[in-house]
Image (tube, rainbow, N blue to C red):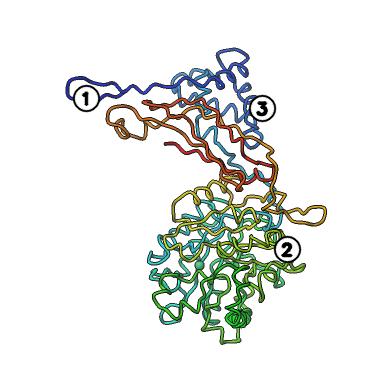
Amino acid sequence: MGSYRVCCCFTRKFKVTEADPPSDVSEAFRKYADGGIHMTADQLWRFIEECQGGNGGSVAKLDAERIVEQVLHKRHPITSLINRKTLTLEDFHHYLFNFELNPPIGSQVHQDMNAPLSHYFIYTGHNSYLTGNQLSSPCSDVPIIKALKRGVRVIELDLWPNSSKDNVHVLHGRTLTTPVELIKCFKSIKEHAFTASPYPVVITLEDHLTPDLQAKVAQMVTETFGEMLFCPESGDLKELPTPESLKYRILISTKPPKEYLEAEEDKRTKSQRVKDPADDDVWGKEPSRATSYRDKSHKVQYGSDESDHDNEDSEIHLKKSDSCPAYKNLIAIHAGKPKGGLEEALKVEKDKVRRLSLAEQALEKAAERHQQQIVRFTQRNILRIYPKGTRFTSSNYKPLVGWLHGAQMIAFNMQGYGRSLWLMHGMFRANGGCGYVKKPDFLMTNGPNNEAFDPKAKLPVKTTLKVKVYMGDGWHLDFKQTHFDAYSPPDFYTRVGISGAPADEIMRKTKPKEDTWTPVWNEDCYMSRVSMSGSYRAFATSQFIFY
Ligand SMILES: [Ca+2]
């Protein structure tokens, strides 16, 4: 209870009342406690199994006993010593609200981890070494460590020669970002790769190096990671290995050096075709590297991302035909864009898998007409999407476009803030937060005529989701009593929504509850317009926002 004075003449009381358990909670208690006033561990176990689906996994009776003990220990530290092993209604209510004892999402890996990597969405960072914006923030290994600790499994490093061209720096090329040494990044990756998850870490390299420096990188990689490194025995992989088989392994993914010459040819062909409007239709408008060479200020504005998928900028070594075999042998997942247009890039080869990178807007363009080809490509190969170059502030984009097309690596700026990033973090809370979430079956299997899933297909409404918003509690512990309103407790309302496929996106709002720290809504939010087929449901992430 708190109080404060108004006009020095009377004191207004600010009692924070504990709300009674909602009626559904009382009913569940009555039902599982067989009408009694105490619930045993066995009864709680039955409730968890039947009402909470085992909380994301099968709960042993021993777990229920442990929960009872912990609730009692927390709520009745003295009584718990004198042998009561049952919960009251209030204890039960406390358990339901307790984030640790009753987590909203299971903390165990529960999906099959024995499918090829292409079957999973992978928690992916973009320019993982940047501490802030894309133009002038310092580069460091700290954001890399932070991302790995969060469970991020794909780390991107942009490699550039230092000023004396005898060592490798990590920085965002053609910007004012201050570099960090590559070896420092590698060492930190080694140290922290598997603290959050045992599943493999992929390092995507955006490589702007000469063969000499590539040799240096090869040596650094070998010396740093040693046995942790996964290198396919014979060049190209025919199928991607599984996360299970790659536990505690590091994979390098970049463009093999031999392709630089081809990239140059591709660039020439491209510049000849630059006026062909059909190019724009397919690939989207990609700012060309040539422009940034001509205009220095433009260079600084855009950085090097716009071409990080095809190394158009590698002028220095484009002219050299010698490549570094040691470096090439380290590449587990070959990246690159074949010559020709999108059709060629999305071709599925029987005896070879690879990684293709597209900028967010290139994907959107490609998705207009080639949606099924993209889905088919991602059944065996890896598709990486990266933020467009104008996201100077390290903002992100909607990840759903990529997910709906099966893109495994939606590369995000993890140091930022905002709804897209929350959604990304939310997605990867699934499957025990291990950084790999299995793609839904509909993206991996084709129809009777071998047709891939069509993300544009109109699907009928199949499910209506009902979310019951009971109450909010705990704000009085985090805010001063006068934080929101100097004269009375605050007003609260809740927004509940679904982020998902376009047909599923919806937001509902509860009524506001006035003058209370513990608002009780007890209100149903129906998402009745949601066309949640079983398939779309895989992408539906609920958002709860309190105001
Ligand atoms: Ca990059």
Q: Give the x, y percent position of residue 255.
A: 60, 73
- Residue 380 visible within the image: no
| Residue at image point 67% right, 36% down | 463
Inter-mark Cα distance, 2 to 1: 72 Å
**Residue ranking furthest to the right:** 448
Q: How far is the residue under mark 1 from the one under mark 3?
A: 50 Å
Q: Which mark is residue 239?
A: 2
Rendered position, 4 above or below 545: above
- Indicate the secondary structure of the residue bearing disc 1: strand
Q: Closer to the N terminus: mark 3 or mark 2?
A: 3
Residue 49 in percent (x, y) is at: 66, 29
Vertical side of 392 occupied by 218: above or below: below
Q: Nearer the viewer, mark 2 or mark 1?
A: 1
- Label 1 belongs to which residue? 5
Q: Secondary structure at mark 2?
A: loop
Q: Amino acid at mark 2?
A: Glu
Tell me which label, 2 or 1, sits earlier in the chain.
1
